[in-house]
Amino acid sequence: MPRITDTQPELPETPIASDAAKDERAEERNVLTLVLHQILFRTAWIFKTESVILPAFLDSITDVGWVRGMLPPLNRFAQSLAPVLLSDRLSRTSLKSRWLARTTFLMAVPFLSLGGMLLLFGHSSPAWFVAFFLTSYAAFFCVCGVNQAAYNTIQGKLIRPDRRGRLAAISGNAGSAVAVLMAWILLRPWTQHQPPHFAYIFLFTGTTFLLAGFTVRGLREDADPIVTRSPIDARRRFAVARQAVRSDPHLRRLCCLAALFVCSQLLFPHYQRLGRIQPGYEGRMLMVWVVAQNLSAAAFSWFSGRLADRRGTRAALRWLTFLAMFAPPLALSLAEFADVRWYWLSFAWLGLVPVTFRMMLNYALELTSRENHPIYVSTVVLCMAPPIILSPLVGDIVHRIGYVVPFCGIAAVVLVAWCLSLVMVEPREVTFVQSVPGDSIEAE
């Protein structure tokens, strides 16, 4: 007689359940791949921190204040213009991950070139080397702007909105941990040497960007329908960006917030200069400042990512903007009243600035449908460019009258940005509809 059991026969998996499970596994793989990409990306980034390493290198080849003030406009204009010009190409390409891989590879070229030039000429750099450095700096950030647009577009395509905060938190913590470890092993001895071994720093940076580009091959992305490429038309791209701002009041507020907040970047080259003129400064402190900024960026990424997933991107953006207004007065207070060994706290507070920029772009992704992500992201970045024109003027003011007036003035501008964040909507509570296919969006 056959034995009777309570085991029920397994029901066949339905096609819908099978597709859902497959999508879930693909998303998990993509999250892990993007985390690995960001770990290597952040490791490269810590070795070229534009608030510490690059201004210190520029100071080693020239001491002209307005030249140091050229770094923020080159940075921001390069990051702003290139994505707008190429946003249509990015939106029309079938596999966005190819753009992320190629631009990450290209970000290695300026640093490999700079490192090779330093090995060739040593510390007796020719007179034209300042121009070569500034050109390489601008080229790097042109590619970086497109890379940023590609990364955010891939996030919008492959990662659900309620998991993007988790991605930011994991990549921020893991990336900063690895970056700090590598900085302790390599950057510490390279910066202790006088003058610092900038050639080794730049060569390592370029090599790590190359490795980050290879990781993108692990992404699982379904090809979008092939769309005929249109020629790059600068006037049309700017017209599309202007139309997006005019038709969407929520994007308009975000662009105003971005234009105000980016003024905090005007001071980036001067924080390290303010610290280096303090009594008791030592070369190894450059490494300490870099580590402090990157560890704090990880902490702020975790905090803002969790807050964005639970309460929405607007809440995270409000808190980050509020905290950022205290960065300039904190640096002034530490320089005036504290020992230089405590000046690392100002760089720890600066770690929230790049996190705020990333949260702005996440907010832009939630304002529109996926096919419009490239133009929305590039439009927000473009609106950050005009205020940066003032950077050489700020550098000249710092050189002539000191740090107090420009630092307090920028803190007041960021305060206005925070007030603007109080009247912005939470995208997850608003329904958005497409008004003009492919180019502009209007929110209801």
Image (cartoon, grey):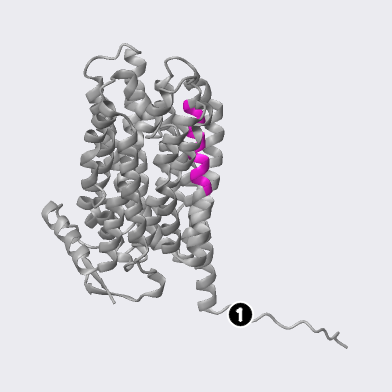
Quadrant of res 184: top right
The residue where tag 1 is placed is 12
111, above or below 282, in the image: below
- The count of marks equals 1
Three-letter amino acid code at the position of disc 1:
Pro
Q: Main secondary structure of the magenta part?
A: helix
| Residue 283 horizontal side relative to residue 110, left or right | right
Residue at 39%, 40% in the rendered image: 328
Residue at 28%, 39% in the rendered image: 75
Residue farthest to the right? 1
- Quick one: label 1, few (<14), some, or many (20+) residues within 10 Å? few
Q: Position of residue 198 (x, y in %)?
A: 40, 22
Residue 428 colored in magenta in the image: no
Q: Position of residue 154 (x, y in %)?
A: 38, 57
Residue farthest to the bottom? 1
Q: Position of residue 272 (x, y in %)?
A: 40, 29
Q: Nearer the viewer, residue 64 or 178?
A: 64
Q: Nearer the viewer, residue 440 or 40?
A: 440
Quadrant location of the C terminus? bottom left
Residue at 14%, 59% in the rendered image: 239
Asked whether residue 132 is in view, the answer is yes
| Residue 163 horizontal side relative to residue 70, left or right | right
Q: Position of residue 247 (x, y in %)?
A: 20, 69
313, above or below 216, in the image: below
Q: Magenta part of the protein: which range?
A: 286-299
